[in-house]
Image (cartoon, grey):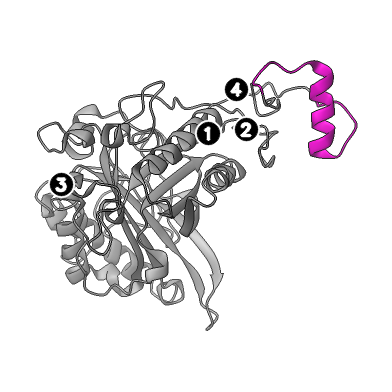
Amino acid sequence: MSRRGLLTASGAGVAAGAVATAGAFLLGEPEPEPAASAAPPQAVAFHGPHQAGIATPVQDRLHFAAFDVAVSTREELVALLVSWTRAAEAMTAGRVSAADDSGEALDLPASRLTLTVGFGPTLFARAGEDRFGLAAARPPALADLPAFPGEKLDPARGGGDLAVQACADDPQVAVHAVRTLARIGLGRVSVRWSQLGYGKTSSTTPAELTPRNLMGFKDGTGNIPYDDRAALDEHVWVAAADGPAWMTGGSYLVARRIRMHLEAWDQVTRQDQEATIGRTKTEGAPLGGKGERDRFDPAALPADSHVRMAHPTANGGVRLMRRGYSFVDGSDSQGRIDAGLFFLAYQRDPRRQFVPMQRRLATGDRLSAYIRHVGSGLWACPPGVSPGGYWGDTLLG
């Protein structure tokens, strides 16, 4: 049943009169519901070998939340993940997840909603405690991220036992999804921190116009396309040989809240900005080129330019699947805009991909003068869910 319908407690079909009554109760209006929109539902399949929201064309909006788990037994953790999975199956299909749905998305289509879940290091053990009997199953690739030069991490914006990434083309659909999971988990989980994002900054669809970040530059030109299976297998999906077995088909997510010093950036000349990035601002072409996707020699760019230092040729050939979003969270106490990039990157092994790349960027990237990493997290995202299964059943089942 679509979000316009309501589920009865028994799960049986709802008669037309009952729908009208329930609609009046929820919306405070006696009129019957308007006719359903003719627009396509735009639902992304929930089930499959990999979780949706990774190699999925990037949507326009993000609501990301990290949760701490309050339950103490493995059985309670499984029950939570089962209930979350059932709700996610409904919401991503554009249906209500329960009769007591909060209601703010009732009139909205699925909007390509995807929900992606990850398990943080503290779910396996916290302060030396094997909380759920999972310590031995912690993947070696889920090693705590090291400290990087120049970062100033806020503990209130990092970590978390569980991560939920909700992406959709409608912000209300994404917010509703996370709100629903938080409501279902009341008393069993608590929100540790969260982040809203808009204006995708890393496209996975090369045929579409490349988006721009808040610095005004096109971002994601060289990102892994969502349908490049060979590149996904090489750089994103955990292979059986990587281990552990429960992560085969999964991926590792690194999230970084990167604040941009936009006031300082705006005082720099366009020529200096382009030398910092390594691309022209208008076309997005590599310096010396004409088109955004022109082939270029990274060695011909300024040695400390961002594009040169982040290029696979400078990092042992490794690549990341990036799904970043811009954020603007008002202003700080000094009147400076609190804005930047919420960096999301999926990869096969952070020890071989994100960590060495970030070490290199933190010590030599000219762009570092205008950004600061202020939040961080790492999660193991298990493979996709089969019908009847649940998030993490390869680990907990």
| Pointers 1 and 2 in contact (C-beta within 8 Å) | yes
Quadrant where the N terminus is found in the figure: top right
Kindly identify which numbered label has been placed on residue 40: 4
For mark 4, does the 10 Å Cα neighbourhood hold few (<14), some (14 to 19), or many (20 or more) residues? few
Which percent across, then down, holds residue 361?
A: 21, 64
Q: Earlier in the sequence, mark 4 or mark 3?
A: 4
Q: Amino acid at mark 2?
A: Ala
Name the residue tied to disc 2.
Answer: 98
**In this rendering, the label closer to the viewer, 1 or 3:** 1
Name the residue tied to disc 3.
Answer: 318
Residue 299's image quarter? bottom left
Distance from the alpha carbon under mark 4 to that under mark 2: 23 Å
Residue 109's image quarter? top right
Range of residues picked out in magenta: 10-34
Q: Amino acid at mark 4?
A: Pro
Q: Amino acid at mark 3?
A: Val
